[in-house]
Amino acid sequence: MQWSFNPYTSIASYVTGGGREDVWVERGLSGTGTKTLENAMQLIFGRTFEGWTGPGRTYYELHQEYAHLTGIHWRPEKRAYCRFNEHGDLEPVVSVTSREDKGSNIDLVSFKWEPLEEYLAASNASLVRMFDFTLLRRSGFSGWSDEPTQEIIESPDFFYRQKVMPGYAAYTRGVQIIRPRRTLEAIFTDMTDRWFGRSNKQYVEFIAYDWRNKRVTRISTDPAATTNYFQAKENALPFEVSPAFFRPEVLLKYKMDRDKYTVSDRDVSCRAGWHLPAIDVNEAGQVHAYICYLRRLPYEEQLHWLSYNEPPKASISERAFINDFKGEFVNFVQPLQKVLSIVRRWHDDKVVWWTLRDEKLLERVNTPLTESRDEWAEAFMDLAKLVIEGFETKEIRARLDKAQVPYEMEDKTIALLEKLLSKTGTGVEKLAGLRTVQLLRSKAKGHAGGSGAHQLAQDALTEHESFASHFQHVCLQVADELESIETWMP
């Protein structure tokens, strides 16, 4: 009841004197007015930057142990310590309002209860919160009376002292002890289920190929609905590596939000949220994924995939069969992967005539899978940003100067490369692949509504039947051209 410290108490202090000539550090709470809190841990620290008169003079920190265990970080735009939730969205866990915020006349630090309850349970602790409310009429108040203070115990976890001077002043000051509301078993079960991917209690049924029983059927993502190699003798359930098949549009949602999602040839991931490995595209253009990995997705994501689910039109891809079932590496490389392999090598070797402008581009370039012209144009935009924008024009001109090859100052990167290659005797006169990428980047994406863009799209479909085939064809050209450039650009 005599608790006397406040959020501005320091976590440690230098001490000297007391018959000693040295200086030492004293940590923890002291002078609190109660033995109960001598070994307590302070969660909130108010800091004031003395001498600073601008914004942020007073701010609040968290005890690092709590911040680290909950995986939260300060995000100024949210005015909160945040983390990503299972959907990849920023989740405020500890929110801070200060008097510097517009429209605020209080300082308030609020904790989301579930993470705090987990911390209390795991550290075998309780939260101790002091409250102090004072009301008075200043014009008629001359001091507190000598009347004894009332001490009121509402419960073992809620008690206070109170003095009331009717019509003039009153105060109520006390302590609230807050313990975990759920049982420790329930809290720890939820924590471990979340860590090991068992927290998803809702499942869906996908149309999938049950290759164990040689049939197309509905298979639930509930672990009890499938089996594995070790338990197969005891049942006739489908294997958990049964593939489900989806229309290629299932990936558009993820391709449209590159900050939140990463899509590659064989996996999709959501930042700090979830990861779906071992996907691929079969000969019919369907995306396929295994039941055992689909069940790891949040329920809302499972529903998204379910909305694009359809019966298989072809087997799983040859690459998936070789990688996932034979456990071997494929002896062929997809055209886009060949391009990515070359530029990764250039980046690792730190060549002076090409620079990776943004490492995220290595993950953003994807083969278009749908009939969407926007997806097709976006793919070429990303490919141009990765490959063409990476060339260092100054270095290419230096090599042309050294080889005494004339050029115009208005010549762009591709034209300069063509002049350099023609001088080296490689037989390369035009970089057709790179020129196609640049053309589609400027026409199809830059002027998506124009007749020129429409004609380019029609030409691609007429010659290659699908945007995916056209993109792969151009990537194969680009890969060959990059290899030629690499040969003559030491």
Image (cartoon, rainbow, N blue to C red):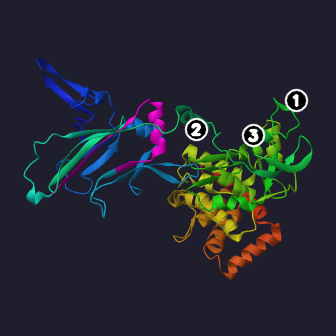
Single out the mark in the foreground, 2 or 1: 2
First in residue order: circle 2 vs circle 1: 2
- In the depicted view, which residue is nearer to us: 263 or 237? 237
Q: Residues within 10 Å of mark 1 (few under 14, many from 20)?
A: few
Horizontal side of residue 182 vs 298, given as left or right: left
User: Which residue type carries mark 1?
Assistant: Lys
Would residue 405 be found to the left or right of residue 72 on screen? right
Q: Residues within 10 Å of mark 3 (few under 14, many from 20)?
A: few
Residue on which disc 3 sits? 223
Magenta-drawn stretch contains 69: no
SS for callout 1: helix
Q: Is mark 3 on a helix, strand or loop?
A: helix
**What span is colored magenta in the figure?**
109-136
Label 2 sits on a secondary structure element that is: helix
Amino acid found under the numbered disc labelled 2: Asp
Residue 123 colored magenta? yes
Q: Where is residue 249 in the image (x, y as percent from the top left)?
A: 73, 62
Q: What residue is shown with label 1?
A: 233
| Mark 1 in CB contact with mark 3 (< 8 angstroms) | no
Distance between mark 2 and mark 1 Cα atoms: 32 Å
- Give the residue furthest to the top: 19
| Residue at image location 78% in from the left, 60% down from the top | 247
Q: Where is residue 417 in the image (x, y as percent from the top left)?
A: 61, 61
Outermost residue toward the right?
214
| Rendered residue at 66%/56% (across/down) | 424
* Mark seen at residue 190: 2
Q: What residue type is labelled 3?
A: Pro
On the image, the x and y values in percent for residue 77 come to: 40, 58
For this view, does 93 lie left or right of residue 153?
right
The reply to whether the C-beta atoms of the residues labelled 3 and 2 are less than 8 Å apart is no
Horizontal relation, residue 51 to residue 435: left or right:
left
